[in-house]
Image: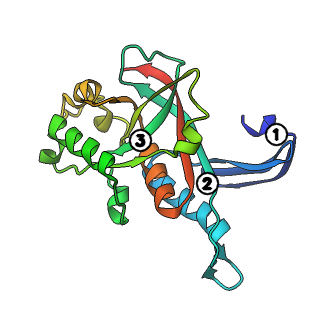
């Protein structure tokens, strides 16, 4: 779907759900990678993308001079605001994770991130249900290119599709009001625009590894 727009494709690789096409648009060399669903898959994809540029496979050592790459997620999501409708686009200013992936790494937050996170915890009382959220920011250098025609807001990343996103088939929900609480959350100029299942992991890992990152999602349902 993406690489059909390349001017030239160098190679294609496929292993399980991880499919990679590398090629060129003009003189710009880039890769498109399908990661599959969830923060756990992002943990694989981002660590191995970093290894490709920052680990010497011959000596099996970390390169002294680190390389930074730009990572742009293109995905689907659900809207949490009435004015952000189906088929509109959201560029996430922050990734707020209600999964647990980044708790296994030493992610440090700046003052603004800490304040947003504290306000979210107070608003939702989510920690009382044994869920410890985390937050990471998009790269300002990438975000500035996605303004006209894009909605901006915090993107919440969930570890599942049903209960974590407020959907019910047969199992009752422990936090039945969480989706409404995310919709009503405000902190200064910040609000939660959408939710999906990968962004916070991308933002957290890219920030730790020194890469630039942005998550751009199309709305497929307004919740």
In the rendered image, the quadrant that contains the N terminus is top right
Report which residue position mark 3 lands on: 94
**For the residue labelled by badge 2, is the local secondary structure a helix, a strand or a loop?**
loop
Answer whether residue 174 is visible to the viewer in this image: no
Q: Position of residue 69 (x, y in %)?
A: 64, 56
> What is the total number of numbered labels drawn onto the structure image?
3
CB within 8 Å, label 2 to label 3: no
* Mark 1 / mark 3, whichever is N-terminal: 1
Q: Is residue 201 left or right of residue 88?
A: left
Answer whether residue 188 is visible to the viewer in this image: yes
Q: Quadrant of residue 163?
A: top left
Kindly report the distance in space between the C-alpha atoms of the residues bearing marks 2 and 3. Answer: 29 Å
**Towards the viewer: 142 or 198:** 142
- Mark 2 crowdedness (10 Å alpha carbons): few <14, some 14-19, many ≥20: few
Kindly report the distance in space between the C-alpha atoms of the residues bearing marks 2 and 1. Answer: 23 Å
- Mark 3 crowdedness (10 Å alpha carbons): few <14, some 14-19, many ≥20: many
Instruction: Kindly give the residue lying farthest to the left in the view shown.
Output: 128
Q: Quadrant of residue 210?
A: bottom right
Report which residue position mark 1 lands on: 6
Question: What residue is drawn where x is 44% and y is 37%?
Answer: 93
In the rendered image, the quadrant that contains the C terminus is top left
Report which residue position mark 2 lands on: 16
* Mark 2 / mark 1, whichever is N-terminal: 1
Q: Position of residue 197 (x, y in %)?
A: 43, 41
Height in image: 47 above or below 165? Answer: below
């Amino acid at each position: 779907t993406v690489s059909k727009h390349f001017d030239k494709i160098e190679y294609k690789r496929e292993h399980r759900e991880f499919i990679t096409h590398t090629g060129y648009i003009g003189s710009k060399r880039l890769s498109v990678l399908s990661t599959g669903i969830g923060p756990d898959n992002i943990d694989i994809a981002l660590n191995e993308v970093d290894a490709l540029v920052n680990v010497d496979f011959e000596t099996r050592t970390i390169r002294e001079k680190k390389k930074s790459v730009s990572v742009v997620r293109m995905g689907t999501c659900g809207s949490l605001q009435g004015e952000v409708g189906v088929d509109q686009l959201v560029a996430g200013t922050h990734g707020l994770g209600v999964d647990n992936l980044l708790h296994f790494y030493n992610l440090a937050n700046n003052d603004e991130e800490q304040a947003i996170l504290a306000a979210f915890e107070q608003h939702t009382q989510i920690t009382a249900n044994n869920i410890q959220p985390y937050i990471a920011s998009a790269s300002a250098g990438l975000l500035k290119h996605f303004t006209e025609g894009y909605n901006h807001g915090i993107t919440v990343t969930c570890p599942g599709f049903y209960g974590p996103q407020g959907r019910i088939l047969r199992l009752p929900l422990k936090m039945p009001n969480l989706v409404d609480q995310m919709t009503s959350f405000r902190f200064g100029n910040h609000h939660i625009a959408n939710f999906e299942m990968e962004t916070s992991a991308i933002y957290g890992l890219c920030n730790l590894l020194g890469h630039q990152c942005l998550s751009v999602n199309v709305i497929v349902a307004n919740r």
